[in-house]
Amino acid sequence: MNPEGPGPELDRLTWTEVRDAIARDAGVIIPVGATEQHGYHLPLSTDVVLAHALALAVAEQADVLVAPALAYGYRSRPLSGGGQGFPGTISLSASTLIAVLSEVLGELIRHGFRRLAVVNWHYENENFVYEAAWLAHERASRSDARILVFENPGGEPSDEVMRALFADEFPGWAAEHAAILETSLMLHLAPDLVRMDRAVDDEAPRRPGYDIVPPPDDLVARSGTLWKATQATASKGELAWAEIVRTVTDELMSEFATGDPDTR
Ligand SMILES: [Zn+2]
């Protein structure tokens, strides 16, 4: 984006600026997060903050707008998000999430965007964001739009990042909630939002290899932190973030470059 210009956030533009972005075939990213507890030390907005920051970081290098983030996600599950019992966790059912996201994608396609991306930062949203993209494409009046779905942006970190983050032990990504990675990223990106003096190491009393509905109390970590938040540092966050931004930016730019039906 032009550094002198109004920036990449779609809702800060005028309609004529959006029209011009569509005319030059700019892409658009929708960040998707959740309003979900993240322990004693991180805000409910953590997943939205990270999804939005990632979209903005990509927009520094790629010609993409960033649509308003979807701040509500699918139901928090005890073994990956602490569950629905924590005050302030506000979630959608799967069908509502799919409906909202697919309709937003449909609106962007209707206006002429052809290069779309969903950047998700909430474990429980996976699959549902893919379904939303599928339905939006199926229902679109035009077939030249493509939607990249980053369910788990950046994918598996490099060995270097894994060693830096989890020198001790890696609990699996589901348990990495409000723990080392997310806390480190927030310390790097939004330190004002982190109450690091309240961070704890915690885990659910029991982590079976299946789920239980309704969730019994012993599947819920009391603090809402599912692993070791005290091991988080801003420098771990900086290292991990650089890799995530680089990976997603490269993937998006190369897909959008090859995705043009006119140049295929
Ligand atoms: Zn999170």
Image: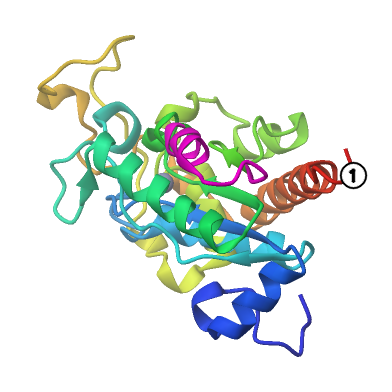
Residue 141 sits inside the magenta stretch: yes
For residue 6, side relative to residue 52 (left or right): right
What is the total number of numbered labels drawn onto the structure image? 1
Q: Is residue 10 above or below residue 152?
A: below
Q: Position of residue 209 (x, y in %)?
A: 33, 9
Please indicate whether residue 38 sits to the left or right of residue 242 in the image. Answer: left
Instruction: Look at the picture and state if 66 lies above or below 214.
Output: below
Name of the residue lying farthest toward the bottom: 4
For image coordinates 31% across by 37% down, the residue present is: 81
Specify the farthest residue to the right: 263
Task: Report the residue at 48% width, 24% height from top.
Answer: 171
Q: Within 10 angstroms of label 1, few (less than 14), some, or many (20 or more) residues?
A: few
Q: Quadrant of the N terminus?
A: bottom right
Residue 107 drawn at (x, y percent): 46, 58
Could you say which quadrant of the image residue 176 lies in? top left
Picture layout, residue 260 above or below residue 213: below
Q: Which residues are magenta?
A: 131-146
State the quadrant of the C terminus: top right
Asked if residue 227 can be seen in this view, the reply is no
Coordinates of residue 117 in the picture (x, y in percent): 60, 49
Instruction: Identify the residue position indicated by label 1 in the image.
Output: 263
Instruction: Report the amino acid beneath label 1.
Output: Thr
Residue 175 lies left or right of residue 81; in this view the side is right
Of the pair 209 and 92, the residue shown nearer to us: 92
